[in-house]
Amino acid sequence: MGIIAFIDLAGSVALLLWGVHMVQTGVQRACGAHLNQFLAHALRNRGQAFLTGLGITALLQSSTATGLMITGFAARGAVQLVPALAVMLGANVGTTLIVQVLSFDVSSIAPLFVLLGVILFRKGSNSIRDSGRAFIGLGLILISLHQFLELLKPYTNNPHLHQMLETFSALPLMELVIGAIITWAMHSSVAMVLLVTSFATHGVISPQEAFVMVLGANIGTSVNPVIEGGAVSPEARRLPVGNLLNRCAGALLVLVFINPIATWFLQLVPNTSRAIADFHTLFNMVLAAIMLPILPLYARFLAWLLPKPQREKVEDPSAPRYLNPSVLSEAPSIAVGNAVREALRLCDNLDTMILSVRKALEEKEPQLAGAARRVENTLDKLNTAIRNYVTSIDTDGMNEEEMFRVEQILSFCTQINNAGNVLDRNVIPAIQKMAKQRIAFPPEMLKPLMTMVRQMYKNLQVSSTLLMSEDEAVARNLVEQKNIFRNIEASSTASYYRKLRAGDKTTQTVGPYLLELLRDLKRVNTHIIAAAAYPVLERQGALLPSKLQPDYTTATPEDEASQADDLTQEETESLKLQDFEENLSKDDFPKDTMTEDDLAEEGTSYATATPLKGPHHQENAEPALFTALDTPKNPPTRLQTPPKP
């Protein structure tokens, strides 16, 4: 065989593998997430589980993808081992159906499949485009098989090739191992069986040898899940190991009687191509019929073979639990779901940090803040692991919705990690520094801090829920919670300056710490809200591109009146508080804007904080500092105002 002929054969095999890949990814993009949800709720009994596995795999044309789905459910205890094994038996049958279809001579309609696929891919919606991708894949499979058969014709009578194959035919176990190894390397039993069929149809190998290599293909396709899941817990390995042992036992049993079985089968089905496809299907159907009744007993055997460890190892909290690398290329939709579940663990760790900060403030125990710093290291490691995992997902098999989820997960993890960094680098050191200096907040100063911490804790729970639900109304409500923090900071800052001017010694000592913690807690809350709310609102077009106000210097009176009508009383009040906060933060805070009565006040309500009156205040006039507050403007937020009904 010359180098050109070898390249032609290798190219045909590569085209076949790519066609199979396009069919699988096209179906996964179109309905992979729906199939995943359907699989999770259709496992009531063994019979239903078997049919579910058969149907899903018939669509996906990948028993490996179905196996990865069900393995994920079994690993986290969402499905028992018996129905999971039944699903795999159905998946083994389902993956043979496309071989049944392609065993007929349908190569003449390959151009039609490609043409239809291109039309759907170029003109349709996302789901239609994915269907077109699957049709293109079918056309490529047929074209590659036809080309492969044409390339084999000159070698059907090659004496050297036949001599080598006769050597292998005397060692059927060797043929079985070769078939398993090639299938494992190709990651596709469909492609392997189609190639074996092509060889047998043109007389390169005998039908009996083809049957043996088909048995090897059934074993080879079960090896990958076992190898890729080797580092997971024994409970998670029971399903792939059980499927592999089941197929190995069946293949070896048939191999013992392969000669009489092959003779009988060829008498029953004289057409070689049809005989190989039928043998492939019948082998898996008989295996399922034998195993379904005894699955409970088989499950107990697997539990004995792979027992749960007697003593659980101390779990590293920074080690990922759900980032299964085996699904990165085979089942991207499952990989995205795994990343979401791991991202929620970030919320659990940030939750722990917030509770530690709250206790450190309430109980004045700085060692609790130190415990929160250790949790932040876990946040960093988990965030890095999730980012590396998500960026390794095979995007070729993902639809637009899943691509958005990937971006959303990355943004969510970054923001949650940033929130933890602010707590670790700013909030906790400030608390510890106060403890070293034996400084404590008086009750009236501790109150706004505790209000912020409690609201921040609630916002974190909503943010983690929003990552799953993507509800626009919930996202809007969460963003509006930022006003609470603005109001608290503005009111507390005003109270601080009043007491400072009154010469309060406690305020002079602890006031700077109060302002610093208020600012940093507000930053933490901003990261928590931005983690889940902003991506949802941005996708819905509910965010303005900037918080910058329009230029009103050229606005007409009608424009200003219309703008004022669009503001609610709450929005106007929120605007005043925001501007008030900004003015208070300036170094040139006016010294003549407070009266003695103002200095005597203990503070103002967070919800009703208003500007301070100056000594020049008159009945119908206000200080120049706050004159602009009555000018209607947009609310201080990027939220789009919902259209009026």
Image (tube, grey):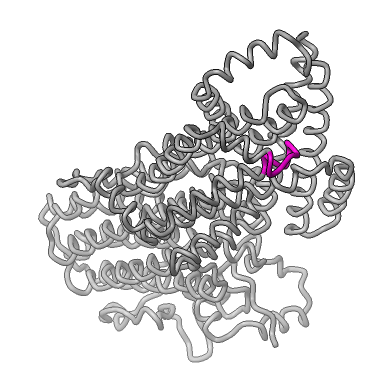
Name the one closer to the observer, 221 or 347: 221
Relative horizontal placement of residue 624, taking residue 229 as reference (left or right): right
Q: Residue 545, located in which quarter of the rendered image? A: bottom right
Q: Where is residue 226 in the image (x, y as percent from the top left)?
A: 42, 38
Asked whether 541 or 620 is in front, the reply is 541
> Which residues are the magenta region?
267-277
Is 198 drawn above or below residue 622 in the view shown? above
Please tell me which residue is depicted at 66% across the width and 47% down the height of the picture.
25
The C terminus appears in which quarter of the rendering? bottom right
Tell me which residue sits at (26%, 70%) in the image.
450
**Above-or-below relation of 636 to 388:** below
Tell me if residue 270 is in the magenta stretch.
Answer: yes
Main secondary structure found in the magenta portion: helix
**Residue 564, image x, y percentages:** 66, 83
**Nearest the camera: 139 or 595?**
139
Q: In this view, does 196 lie to the left or right of 495?
A: right
Would you place residue 34 above or below residue 393 in this image? below
User: Does residue 480 show up magenta in the picture?
Assistant: no
Residue drawn 51% across the image and 21% down it = 174
Where residue 614 sits in the image (x, y, percent)? 42, 78
Is residue 388 among the parts visible in the rendering?
Answer: no
Q: Residue furthest bottom?
A: 619
Nearest the eye: 453 or 249: 249
| Residue 40 as seen in the image, left or right of residue 319 | right
**For residue 630, above or below residue 121:** below
